[in-house]
Amino acid sequence: MAWKKAVIILLLVALVLGCAQQPQKPKVTPTPTAAPVEKIVIGAPLSLSGKYAKEGQQSLWGIQAAVKWVNDVHGGIDVGGKKVKIEFKYYDDESKKETVQSLVERLITVDKVNFLLAPYSSGLTLAGAPIADKHKVLYMSHGGASDRIFEQGYKYVVQTLSPASKYQTGFLDMIKETDPEAKKVAFVYEDAEFSKAVFAGAKSHAEELGFEIVFDKTYPPKPTDLTPILSELKAANPDIVLGGGHFADGQLLASQMADLKVDVKAISIIVAPALPAFYEALGTNAEGICGPGQWEIGVKYSPEAAEKLGIDWYGPTQDEFLQLFKEFAGDEEPSYHAAEAAAAILAYAKAIETAQSTDSDSVRDTMSTLDYMTFFGRWKIDPETGKQIGHDMIVFQWQGGEKVIVWPPEAANAQPYYPIPTWDEKEAGKLAKYE
């Protein structure tokens, strides 16, 4: 019997050891599913009072028009098969840097916004950028053109408008296309941060295109007499002149070029020619003068233009945008400030839909891959810096007392008048207009 007990004991031991060696089934941990997105909150400090109040109000109307298109016309942003609406949260930054900083902090930490729009102007945009970047919240510049914003190493700052360095590059492209024989270019501009950034970009582009820079000088801010520097410029005998800084000096530049009969084939001045007051002050002497702009009513960006370039179209057409804008602004017409702010909202909507996420890192990574067109123009950023590289400045020209768009071809509603009439011809009543 003893041997039977031994066998039984051995069998029991083997059974126990066998059970112990059986692999244990792992516990199943439920895969977490992301909570469905109920709304997408975009926040912004906006200059509704102070020195940038006009630009801030235009920005607000543009944003409201774009949000209405996304929510009501488009039906919301498609995230995970669900249409999600945008909620826009904003405060008045009073056009002050310190207010921008406190509001950006508040929007992130108190209001818990998903994304941010920067305020108008490079200075205010720069004020809020480090705070947004610290919190890893995307911060879209729609009114800050300074290249310096995108030289600070920020990861979460991106741009919708063209940077300052591109303001005069389109004009140079137009001249190169229109008259390859025009080689000699002169630069005369205000000694200020913005204009120096503009013309640093212009000079670099001119050299790339093979132009010869025969004159390159600055004048002090708020000049009262440009005769000496323009006399030097005239002696250099340029084919084309690019210059300006702000409204008053740009108007003075054109007026004294007329006085000194500085006849050239083409002129492009920043800021001043964009305003109707420029033509009102100069009359026919303004004929033929060009200027760069971010956007103008009448641009020909369209689904058809996008198709020709082989890129997507997104958002309302220009006519649809104008109608939506009117619902908020009444009889006021949109300036480029409104258009670029609206384009920033559309950029978020496009990127979120493409990423299928509201995570800042996912949306930022997706933005690096996007290349598409809206009523504002092309949208594409440099993946490393976030600087806008797709959007071209339009070039407008005063023709027959009207401001028309002559470049780029996909936006133009008129042909460039080239070469422009001489100052004597303009004083005699000749217009820069094809019959």
Image (spheres, rainbow, N blue to C red):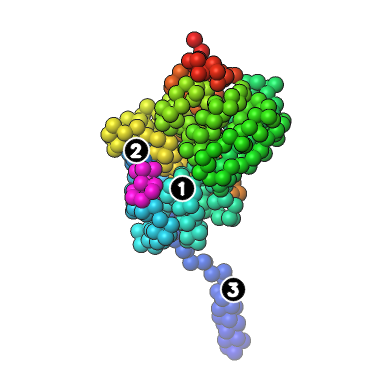
Q: Which residue is mark 3?
A: 21
How many C-alpha atoms fall within 10 Å of the one at disc 3: few (<14), some, or many (≥20)?
Answer: few
- The answer to whether 84 appears left or right of 122 in the picture is left
Instruction: Give the SS element for disc 3.
Output: helix
Amino acid carrying mark 1 in the image: Ser
Disc number placed over residue 133 in the picture, else none: none
Q: Which residue is mark 1?
A: 121
- The answer to whether 169 appears left or right of 356 in the picture is right
The picture quadrant where one finds residue 343 is top left
Question: Which residue sits at x=65%, y=20%?
Answer: 179
Amino acid carrying mark 3 in the image: Gln
Q: Is residue 422 above or below residue 75?
A: above
Question: Which residue sits at x=29%, y=38%?
Answer: 328
Disc number placed over residue 65 in the picture, else none: 2
Q: Earlier in the sequence, mark 2 or mark 1?
A: 2
Q: Is residue 332 above or below residue 86?
A: above
Which one is nearer the viewer's eye here, 2 or 292? 292
What range is drawn magenta here?
A: 43-57
Which one is nearer the viewer's eye here, 230 or 93? 230
Q: Is residue 194 visible?
A: no
Question: Which residue sits at x=54%, y=69%?
Answer: 24
Q: Position of residue 10 (x, y in %)?
A: 60, 82
Question: Mark 2 and 1 residues: CB-CB less than 8 Å, in contact?
Answer: no
**Distance from the alpha carbon under mark 3 to that under mark 2:** 68 Å
Amino acid carrying mark 2 in the image: Ala
Q: Is residue 68 above or below residue 284?
A: below
**Distance from the alpha carbon under mark 1 to that under mark 3:** 71 Å
Of marks 3 and 2, the one in the foreground: 2
The picture quadrant where one finds residue 260 is top right
